[in-house]
Amino acid sequence: MKIALWFIIILMVSYSVAFSISLWKDKNKSGAIVIMAFALFILIAPYFVLMK
């Protein structure tokens, strides 16, 4: 079950990073930074919640 959850988390992070890169290319640097921070939060938060 944990493998499936981490797979979904990795998919969400990869989509967020790709979206952040597209925002950066469109000259929306502040939006890209916020989305990248959100992607890092998506990656870090489940570790503390699921791995207690």
Image (cartoon, rainbow, N blue to C red):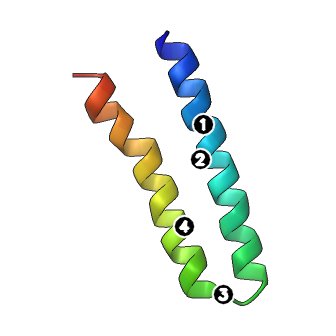
In the rendering, which numbered label is found on residue 28?
Answer: 3
**What residue type is disc 1 on?**
Ile
In space, the residues marked 4 and 2 are separated at their CA atoms by: 10 Å
- Please give the residue where the numbered disc 1 appears in the rendered image: 10
Badge 3: residue crowd in 10 Å (few <14, some 14–19, many ≥20): few
Judged from this view, the residue extending furthest toward the left is: 52
What residue is rendered at 57% in x and 17% in y?
A: 4
Left or right of 41? Residue 52 is left
How packed is label 2: few (under 14 Cα within 10 Å), some, or many (20 or more)?
A: many
Residue type for callout 2: Val
What residue is shown at x 47% (from left), y 60% (from top)? 38
Report which residue position mark 4 lands on: 35
Residue 20 in the image: above or below residue 52:
below
Left or right relative to 19: residue 36: left
State the mark number for residue 13: 2
Q: Amino acid at mark 3?
A: Asn
Where residue 20 sits, quadrant-wise, is: bottom right
Residue 3 rendering spot, x and y as whole percentages: 54, 15
Q: Is residue 27 above or below residue 11?
A: below
Q: In the rendered view, would you say 19 is above or below 24? A: above
CA–CA distance in space, label 4 to label 3:
11 Å
Pointer 3 or 2: first along the chain? 2
Mark 2 touching mark 1, by CB under 8 A? Answer: yes
Residue 11: quadrant of the picture: top right
Taking the spot 53% from the left edge, 75% from the top edge, the residue there is: 33
Mark 4, Cα crowd under 10 Å, few <14 / some 14-19 / many 20+, is many
